Amino acid sequence: MRKPAPSPQLPLAGEGKRGPDGHIAYLLRQAAGAQRLRMERALADLDATPAQFVILTLLKAYPGISNADLARLAMLTPQTVSVIIQTLEKHGLLIRLPHAVHGRILHLVISEAGAALLARCRERVAALEAAMVAGLTPTQERTVREWLVRQAVEEG
């Protein structure tokens, strides 16, 4: 039985097709993956995940948002959002309050503990974001932000 040929040395981030000459869509995905890993590491000792951080952030920004809209904005499946909400609620980070007019409708609200956790997470994520744009002039940062938004809103 023959051994398979060893694979060639794979390039590190920034090298070969993983560098400036790579496909821009791949580079964008590579950067997003690296940022997600940095967020996971930064939030780990707070017992928070990047997805939980996103859900708490969106609930604070858009009080009364539906689960379906929450899933769309978080770019997660409704099932995933449901599990995240259950976990956050179980840990006392979210509470359900009755709607002022429609008694059967329950709104998700961030608890005091949830707001405190969100504040600690925001500090860490803000530091990561500052590191991301370090070295860019304000004009360059604005250009990158506008380009990213344009990629998100343009239809394919």
Image: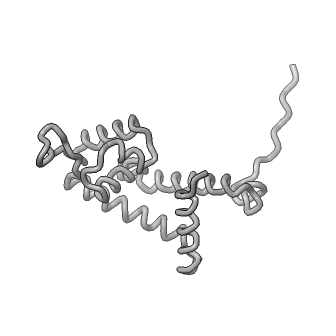
- The residue that appears at 37% across and 65% down in the rendered structure is 123
The quarter in which the N terminus is drawn is: top right
The quarter holding residue 31 reads bottom right
Question: Residue 90, percent across and down?
Answer: 25, 39
Question: Residue 71, percent across and down?
Answer: 39, 44
Most foreground residue, 72 or 89: 72
Q: Residue 128 vs residue 87: left or right?
A: right
Most foreground residue, 35 or 5: 35
Q: How is the image coloured?
A: one colour
- The residue that appears at 75% across and 52% down in the rendered structure is 11
Q: Residue 35 vs residue 62: left or right?
A: right
The quarter holding residue 79 reads top left
- The residue that appears at 58% across and 66% down in the rendered structure is 147
Question: Residue 25, percent across and down?
Answer: 66, 54
Most foreground residue, 24 or 92: 24
- Figure label count: 0
Q: Residue 93 vs residue 145: left or right?
A: left
- The residue that appears at 25% across and 57% down in the rendered structure is 115
- Seen from this angle, which residue lies furthest top? 1
Question: Residue 73, percent across and down?
Answer: 41, 50
